[in-house]
Amino acid sequence: MKCRICGCTEDRACEGGCYWADGDLCSVCFTLRAQLVEYLEIANRATKASVGRLYMEAREVFYGQPITYELSERERGVQFSADADERAGILTDMGISEVVQ
């Protein structure tokens, strides 16, 4: 068997070793993929919050009245295993200073 991402095999494992974690994914790639999905969820949530803030600002400019934007129940319920410093670093790297919850 060969890992579909990194190409490691039973005879040529990843540096530091790996094992078959999920079908044709080794444990290293499986973990990295899970982290990437988590980061993408953080980015998606931050993007939605940023769009919401921009919408509020635009509405206030055009209609002269503030509006409120809240994260949906689903957005508020998303749980991330990354710690707060790691999330802040990811968001900073993307140029996002804060997410309003």
Image (spheres, helix red, strand yellow):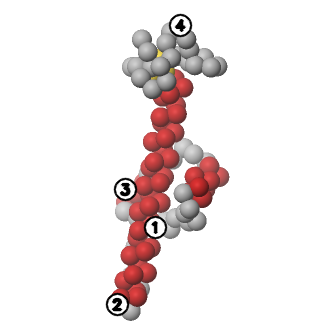
Q: Amino acid at mark 4?
A: Asp
Mark number, residue 85 = none
Local SS, label 3: helix
Residue at which label 2 appears: 63
Q: How many residues crowd mark 2 within 10 Å: few (<14), some (14–19), many (20+)?
A: few
Measured in 3D between alpha carbons, the distance from the residue under mark 4 to the one under mark 3, in whole angstroms, is 44 Å
Local SS, label 1: helix
All told, the count of numbered labels is: 4
Mark earlier in primary sequence (3, 2): 2
Which quadrant of the structure image shows residue 72? bottom left
Measured in 3D between alpha carbons, the distance from the residue under mark 4 to the one under mark 1, in whole angstroms, is 47 Å
Residue at x 59% of width, y 55% of height: 93
Tell whether label 2 touches label 3 (CB within 8 Å). no
Residue at which label 3 appears: 74
Q: How many residues crowd mark 4 within 10 Å: few (<14), some (14–19), many (20+)?
A: few
Residue at which label 4 appears: 11
